[in-house]
């Protein structure tokens, strides 16, 4: 029986929009983590069967199969192929799922999965605007004039009865947890510094409910969603080396974790952000694990209502939900976030001796991936 294991995982520090990483081409950002991954593991790039790469806004500098551009920019052999996938915010997590499936099926022996997004270089909303990506027949089907993630976040907050105070309290906690983790060195073993950036750039130490209270709602005049309880616009990349246990043993690699279960599902595209709830339920059912067996959860902080609504449904303890903070504190480089979160998760599992971890992400169009990792 073939399996799929993660040998190692690495990421760039996450850069603020128009910050330290803005001047770096996304192909070169991709090359940076590919090179770092090879260096950390002693990987000979010539044996890589495929690179599966996530990227959402595939236009301009991110068009033309940016995964392949990254392979070439890294100086890897020309016979190493790459493909770029788009499942919106879950693109890099889907890349992991595709790479794992290829390894398990025997199509690959060694694969790289990851992703990139340079949000400093793209027009915001170009692929996920109010109406353009959705045809008139889709808008007619759902009886709406537009589909918008910010409005979806407002709908989630209303449906689950989440107040602005609760959202801001959660957001301040995200910054506090990230600061605590950074000060404890929790990220040092996973980062590939670049352009002088050695830590996630978006962290705002000392964030509080009071400091967030002055921010104006972003999507509704009387709404509860604002810049401080939403994910930051960011640049970054991450990469994971995926193979079988047998191949790892033959090549002298000691894997970090096994990819235990991976699923994807769709949900209401109007509210859009609730997909992690059915995706988590599907992953648990397919894995045979109970929610209480999972020791750490990464639920992407696209907006504060997303993890809070998810938590209300599953009743998990505060301390195991996004234990290192999340995208509200450090940013959400769309096509790279799935790999960045998984890098954070797998290193946290190793550092804390956590057997099972679960990652899930909401995605535009009302979809979500969920992946369960098992520590090795």
Image (cartoon, rainbow, N blue to C red):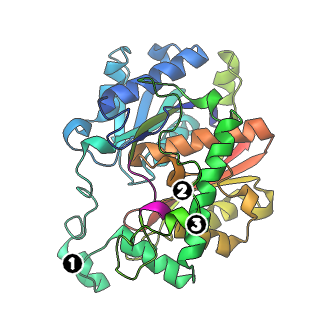
Q: Quadrant of residue 237?
A: top left
Circle nearer the viewer, 1 or 2? 2
Which one is earlier in the sequence, the residue at label 3 or at label 1? Answer: 1
Which one is earlier in the sequence, the residue at label 2 or at label 3? Answer: 3
Tag 3, which secondary structure?
A: helix
Decide which of 173, 97 is in the foreground and name it: 173
Q: Position of residue 212 (x, y in %)?
A: 50, 64
Q: Is residue 230 magenta?
A: yes
- Residue 297 in view here: yes
Tag 2, which secondary structure?
A: loop
| Quarter of the image where the C terminus is located | top right
* In the displayed structure image, the side of residue 321 where residue 73 appears, left or right: left
At a point 41% along the width and 23% down the height, the residue shown is 195
The residue pinned by badge 1 equals 137
The residue pinned by badge 2 equals 300
Q: Are marks 1 and 2 in contact (CB under 8 Å)?
A: no
How far apart are the two marked residues, 1 and 2, measured between alpha carbons?
30 Å
At a point 51% along the width and 41% down the height, the residue shown is 339
Q: Is residue 277 above or below residue 329?
A: below
Q: Are marks 2 and 3 in contact (CB under 8 Å)?
A: no
Q: Position of residue 370 (x, y in %)?
A: 57, 56
Q: Residues within 10 Å of mark 1 (few under 14, many from 20)?
A: few
The span picked out in magenta is 227-233
Q: Residues within 10 Å of mark 3 (few under 14, many from 20)?
A: some
Circle nearer the viewer, 2 or 3? 3
At a point 69% along the width and 71% down the height, the residue shown is 314
How far apart are the two marked residues, 3 and 1, measured between alpha carbons?
42 Å
At a point 63% along the width and 44% down the height, the residue shown is 179
Q: Position of residue 219 (x, y in %)?
A: 34, 73
Q: Residues within 10 Å of mark 2 (few under 14, many from 20)?
A: many
Numbered tag placed on residue 209 in the rendering: 3
Tag 1, which secondary structure?
A: helix
């Amino acid at each position: 029986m073939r399996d799929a294991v993660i040998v190692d995982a690495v990421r760039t520090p996450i850069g603020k929009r128009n910050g330290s990483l803005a001047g770096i081409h996304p192909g070169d950002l991709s090359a940076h983590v590919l090179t770092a991954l090879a260096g950390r593991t002693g990987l000979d790039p010539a044996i890589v069967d495929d690179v599966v790469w996530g990227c959402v806004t595939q236009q301009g500098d991110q068009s033309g199969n940016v995964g392949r551009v990254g392979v070439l920019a890294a100086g890897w052999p020309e016979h190493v192929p790459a493909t770029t996938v788009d499942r919106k915010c879950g693109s890099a997590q889907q890349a992991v799922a595709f790479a794992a499936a290829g390894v398990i099926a025997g199509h690959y022996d060694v694969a790289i999965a990851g992703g990139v997004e340079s949000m400093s270089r793209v027009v915001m909303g170009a692929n996920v605007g109010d109406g353009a990506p959705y045809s008139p027949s889709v808008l007619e089907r759902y009886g709406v004039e537009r589909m918008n993630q910010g409005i979806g976040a407002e709908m989630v907050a209303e449906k689950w009865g989440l107040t602005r105070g609760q959202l801001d309290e959660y957001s301040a906690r995200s910054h506090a947890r990230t600061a605590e983790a950074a000060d404890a060195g929790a990220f040092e073993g996973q980062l590939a510094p670049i352009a002088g950036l050695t830590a996630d750039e978006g962290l705002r130490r000392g964030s509080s409910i009071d400091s967030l209270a002055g921010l104006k709602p972003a999507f509704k005049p009387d709404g509860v969603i604002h810049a401080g309880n939403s994910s930051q616009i960011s640049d970054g990349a991450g990469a994971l080396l995926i193979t079988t246990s047998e191949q790892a043993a033959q090549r002298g690699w000691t894997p970090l974790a096994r990819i235990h279960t991976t699923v994807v599902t769709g949900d209401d595209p109007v509210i859009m952000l609730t997909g992690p709830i059915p995706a988590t339920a599907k992953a648990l059912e397919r894995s045979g694990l109970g929610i209480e067996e999972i020791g750490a959860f990464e639920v992407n902080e696209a907006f504060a209502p997303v993890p809070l609504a998810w938590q209300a449904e599953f009743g998990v303890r505060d301390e195991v939900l996004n234990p290192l903070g999340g995208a509200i504190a450090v940013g959400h480089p769309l096509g790279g976030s799935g790999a960045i979160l998984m890098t954070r998760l797998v290193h946290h599992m190793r550092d804390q001796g956590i057997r099972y971890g679960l990652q899930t992400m909401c995605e535009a169009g009302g979809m979500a991936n969920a992946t369960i990792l098992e520590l090795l």
